[in-house]
Amino acid sequence: LDKKVKQNNWEEGNFINYKKMSENLAIVRSRLNRPLTYAEKILYSHLDDPEGQEIERGVSYLRLRPDRVACQDATAQMAILQFMSAGMPSVANPTTVHCDHLIEAQVGGAKDLERAVSINKEVYDFLSSSCAKYNIGFWRPGSGIIHQILLENYAFPGGLLIGTDSHTPNAGGLGMAAIGVGGADAVDVMANLPWELKAPKVIGVKLTGQMSGWTAPKDIILKVAGILTVKGGTGAIVEYHGPGVETISATGMGTICNMGAEIGATTSVFPFNDRMYDYLKATKRTAIGDFARTYAKELREDEGAEYDQLIEINLSELEPHINGPFTPDLATPISKFAQAAKENGWPEELKVGLIGSCTNSSYEDMSRAAAIARDALNHGVKAKSAFFVTPGSEQIRATIAKDGQLQTFEEFGGVVLANACGPCIGQWDRKDVKKGEANSILSSYNRNFTGRNDGNPATHSFVTSPDLTVALAIAGRLSFNPLTDKLKDKDGNEFLLSPPTGDSLPPTGFDAGNDTYQAPPKDRSTVEVKVSPSSDRLQLLQPFNAWDGKDYTDMPILIKTKGKTTTDHISMAGPWLKYRGHLDNISNNMLIGAINAENDEANKVKNILNGQYDAVPAVARDYKKNGIKWVVIGDWNYGEGSSREHAALEPRHLGGVAIVTRSFARIHETNLKKQGMLPLTFSDPADYDKIPTDAKVDIKCTELEVGKPVTMVVHPKDGKPFEIKLSHTFNEPQLEWFRNGSALNVILILSFP
Ligand code: F3S
């Protein structure tokens, strides 16, 4: 275990530390004295303090030291901007950035890529130069989708990775615990702070039997999603085990882990096995495979490990599934699908079939899909539906070009798109139907929420395996079951499609294709980070001011929100995505979706300076201009939804100091603390009702101490002032964040005392 084995073939000084992991594990074992699941082993072997850490699944907060960080281009911008404001010369932990989300599908690979490079030039220039400056590996546009690149290059058994994208768990296909997080968490690890995660529960999925015929790895997760539903995995890691595991390719396991995000799971993992070894070998990482074999005992569950919930699936009996529309957990086996489509009135004609994406673009997926397409071509028929292929990476694209699958898809009538997210994230300039027109599309993607692919709320989007996508695209209708239904060949004779076959790995090896990686230079001192001061998409961040040591007094309530205030209400997505790297511009969406308790309207609040009603960001800006600090009063579970840090940065940027609510969603609460804000809760939630919207408040932050309440004095416009008690969850290091103005300011002070 003492060997020095590199984490990957791109970075020199970063090694896999099985020795340290096994030492940590020994400490935790002696404390817990019970068999451990594999998921627990990965997490506990990455504890910051294995001796002192409290460990109770579903209860304690683990402080962890991940091996790596990965960011996609949409989320990387603010993460890097924040990291820069901490003043460190380079990232403290290995980090990569992947350009995949900003490429729109219009006409096909090369042209689409060229257009994206020109439209997003300033963003790409910024990412490329900042990555070079801070020692971050940069994967240029055209290299492929983050999760495919991670599997091909960076994932390793037993490792812990965080990534700023929800399908990061894809790396579970190589036995890594890979967890999707918000940018603020990524910044912590880049800056060497421990990363906090609530100790997950562990759901076991025991696989027995063996898949055959039309059943593919995707069907396992489609089935699991049907059982657990979109909420069933929340706060849990899904851990696969049992004899059936050995029958699935590493990339197939990746697909299953990837889509585990759809049931809300923290991540999903498979134990290290020979299929992973084969994949490591095929991707030129035999040394890692061999090293993992020496540590293999700890790269799987202990005998007798107990799961919080257990599901069993017999692969020999598993039918192919199609899930949807509009939600990934509505699972229907293919034998019942035609009937379900009819009963529910789902549009019968299949307009478009799409394969690939981060979920399903392995060599195996492409080979099986091409085998079905070739079978159809041999009978003289092509795709009836429009057909798109998204290769997950440049390596996959080049390899299927070399081995002929790509040509088969084109002959079949398919369009090969850029190696990027494209239609999976709505980057799709779809022309064949009008907005509002009901229609059906089928993809091998993972997520099919309303409007996600083409922005058309009437599009019925279904997800399935690449195999069924191709088969149904040949028939051009939802009512086709390739297992039982015949098609007509070019002469009108009936035929049954052959069940798909395909190699899980390329028989003559992978072709890396074009060189799309930018390694950070050795001497980075002269690299200049490119941010144009006139840019409307990017803006350098200034550190926030430290607390002045005094109580906050006489503050207006910018808005008292009523009911749900999610991160979408606080910082909307959609067209605002464009400004993710520009704090001042994106702040124009601050709280515009929240409902004002005073008038039940969104984005209409009274400005106490002139008595006029105006948009929330406009009023906040006016207060800021006049040097007036303000607060927000919120309802239950304020800030639920995504982990986007913009929802905490924006109020801080526009002069807010405290958010006082009945309760918080935890991630948002932590994000507010990190930005130097005060997230406070009514000690008696009924006090929410006592606060008039036009009152002013004082918050006695000089009283702030761990575990002690804080006083808020409320001054109603007409009437006597009164006091109420507010609670908080700050611990001592977090109070330092508040005092210094932000978590990053604390690092700044440590680096430049
Ligand atoms: Fe991209 Fe879709 Fe995956 S957006 S990262 S291809 S889920």
Image: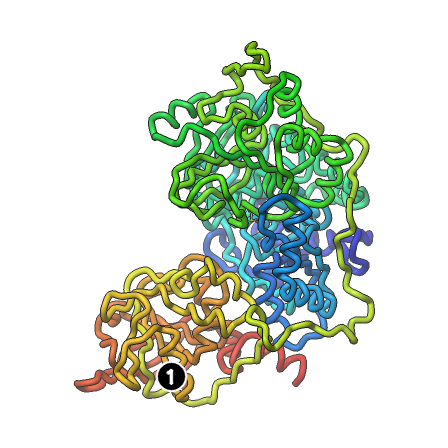
Q: Quadrant of residue 337?
A: top left
- Pinpoint residue 72: horizontal percent, then vertical percent: 61, 56
- Rendering coords of residue 137 (x, y %): 72, 59
* Residue type, label 1: Tyr
What residue is shown at x 58% (from left), y 78% (from top)?
A: 746
Where does the image place residue 672, in percent across and percent down from the top left? 46, 71
Crowding at dot 1, Cα within 10 Å, few <14 / some 14-19 / many 20+, comes out as many
- Left or right: residue 503 versus residue 568 is right
Horizontally, residue 357 falls left or right of residue 650, namely: right
Taking the spot 57% from the left edge, 76% from the top edge, the residue there is: 541
Is residue 385 placed above or below 739 in the rendered structure? above
**Outermost residue, left direction?**
719
Q: In this rendered view, identify the residue nearer to me: 593 or 639.
A: 593
Residue in the foreground of this view, choosing between 689 and 616: 616
665 or 95, which lies in front?
95
Residue annotated with mark 1? 623
**Which residue is pictured at 68% across the width and 60% down the height?**
95
Viewer-nearest residue: 253 or 724: 253
